[in-house]
């Protein structure tokens, strides 16, 4: 028996009280969305809005079955996306390595889609919820995993996230979901999350363009602007004065080249609106004659920072593509700068913030062709993709070197595994090959 029993009991009570307080603190202050319950980084890209996890490891059946439910669950788009992701997760030989006995923890993926409306438009509901748990366990789901979404588009985003939860174990030859049970609630921060692809400077085969589109879905980018022709109508109108029939047209109307540029833009806007289209103009139009633009105009920023605040202050909507951080042909822009580009910078008014639709990274093609376009896009485009999808509070709380960088390394490896030739993350110049041997997890 301890010599001082009262003191010993007091110490024991203090230890127990501290343990209980710590447990209560963990319950009331769960780990941030960028960390698992064990404090490890969440290797999901882009980072979901809300994440809770556990400490279990679940095995996933290589013959994972789809259980579609709800009015939209039977959509062919859901079935096709499921087959696609199952093919990405499981190697062709995985079926031959099936467990002889004991079964799998996750044998079925239930996808519930609450609406049969498949209308695709800007601002469509892309939210989803994921539950993954062992059957019979706490918060268990029959069959192991469930995705719930209001639309098929939310379901497809959820399938991408679920596929990233599935990790191959090289020792057991099983696909596993680690840190289960998982409960993920997610939705995008911005509706417009785009990539501009320029094929006017260098020809890109259709298969390469399709590969770019496929890779965009892995980072939850949703819009591709296709620059198929070199832009002939710009603020530099010197060529108009040396083209005889254009010069004659200008003289007959007593117009300067700047007048003609304004006439062209406003006439194009008029035609677009008659067709029920929304005009999107580069920022030069706003800088030159903002008072004449149609109120429906979306202004596309590219020249530098500080434009969107001016645009939304005038009541227009804005898309950010600041060339200083989001022009992918600028090979000396590091991933950290791409990641830090913020569409709402300088906009504190909540109503004006809603006028910022999102942003677009631009892959201009002067120095990129079939040989290197994908390496130039990835992985830096993923940095912008997370900025556009994930909640500002979550991504702002991360340390770039200790939290974001390991996750971006991991996503780059995922792209490589899926056949996308994403370049090393930390090379001084983008798209350069590795400087030596090593794992994609550290290059």
Image (cartoon, grey):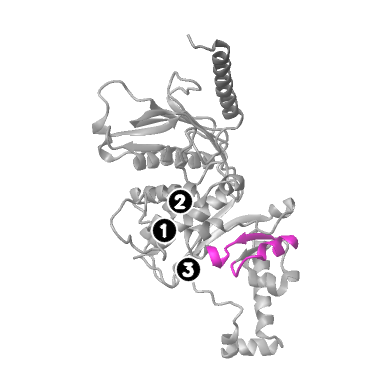
Q: Is there a contact, CB below 8 Å, between mark 1 and mark 2?
A: yes
Image position of 226 with respect to 182: above or below: below
Q: Which residues are magenta?
A: 302-325
| Residue 63 position by quadrant | top left
Whole-angstrom CA distance, mark 1 to mark 3, is 15 Å
Q: Position of residue 396 (x, y in %)?
A: 58, 49
Mark-to-mark CA distance, 1 and 2: 9 Å
Question: Quick check: marks 3 and 2 in contact, CB under 8 Å?
Answer: no
Question: Residue 245 falls in which quadrant of the image?
Answer: bottom right
The one of 68 and 435 positioned closer to us in this rendering: 435
Which sits in the foreground, 281 or 304? Answer: 304
Local crowd size for mark 3, using a 10 Å CA cut-off: few (<14), some (14–19), many (≥20): some
Determine which residue is flagged by label 1: 426
Left or right, residue 165 beside residue 191? left
Residue of label 2: 405
Q: Residues within 10 Å of mark 2 (few under 14, many from 20)?
A: many
Q: Estimate the x, y position of residue 371 in percent, counting from the top left.
A: 34, 65
**Which mark, residue 396?**
none
Quadrant of the image containing the C terminus: bottom left
C-alpha distance separating marks 3 and 2: 20 Å
């Amino acid at each position: 028996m301890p010599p001082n029993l009262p003191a010993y009991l007091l110490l024991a009570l203090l230890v127990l009280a501290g343990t209980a307080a710590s447990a209560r603190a963990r319950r009331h202050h769960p780990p941030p969305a960028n960390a698992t319950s064990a404090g490890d980084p969440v290797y999901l890209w882009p980072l979901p809005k809300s994440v809770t996890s556990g400490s279990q490891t679940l095995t996933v059946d290589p013959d994972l079955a789809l259980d579609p439910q709800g009015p939209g669950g039977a959509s062919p788009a859901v079935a096709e996306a499921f087959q696609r992701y199952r093919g990405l997760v499981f190697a062709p030989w995985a079926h031959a390595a099936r467990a002889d006995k004991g079964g799998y923890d996750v044998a079925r993926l239930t996808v519930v889609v609450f609406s049969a409306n498949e209308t695709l438009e800007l601002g469509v509901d892309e939210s989803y919820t994921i539950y993954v748990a062992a059957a019979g366990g706490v918060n268990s789901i029959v069959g192991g995993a469930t995705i719930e979404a209001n639309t098929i588009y939310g379901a497809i985003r959820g399938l991408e996230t679920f596929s990233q939860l599935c990790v191959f174990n090289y020792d057991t030859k099983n696909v596993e979901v680690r840190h289960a049970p998982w409960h993920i609630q997610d939705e995008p921060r911005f509706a417009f999350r785009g990539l501009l692809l320029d094929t006017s400077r260098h020809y890109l085969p259709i298969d390469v363009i399709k590969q770019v589109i496929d890779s965009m879905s892995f980072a939850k980018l949703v819009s591709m602007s296709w620059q198929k022709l070199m832009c002939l109508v710009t603020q530099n109108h010197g060529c108009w004065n040396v083209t005889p029939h254009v010069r004659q047209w200008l003289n007959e109307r007593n117009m300067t080249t700047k007048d003609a540029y304004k006439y062209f833009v406003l006439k194009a806007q008029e035609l677009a609106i008659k067709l029920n289209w929304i005009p999107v103009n580069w920022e030069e139009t706003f800088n030159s004659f903002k008072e004449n633009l149609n109120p429906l105009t979306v202004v596309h920023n590219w020249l530098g920072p500080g434009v969107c605040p001016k645009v939304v202050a005038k009541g227009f909507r804005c898309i950010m593509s600041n060339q200083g951080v989001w022009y992918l042909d600028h090979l000396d822009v590091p991933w950290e700068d791409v990641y830090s580009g913020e569409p709402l910078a300088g906009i504190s008014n909540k109503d004006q913030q809603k006028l910022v639709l999102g942003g677009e990274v631009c892959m201009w093609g002067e120095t990129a062709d079939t040989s290197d376009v994908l390496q130039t896009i990835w992985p830096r485009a993923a940095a912008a993709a997370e900025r556009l999808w994930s909640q500002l509070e979550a991504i702002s709380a991360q340390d770039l070197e200790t939290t974001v960088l390991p996750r971006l390394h991991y996503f780059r490896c995922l792209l490589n595994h899926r056949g996308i030739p994403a370049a090393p993350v930390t090379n001084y110049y983008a798209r350069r090959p590795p400087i030596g041997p090593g794992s994609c997890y550290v290059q």
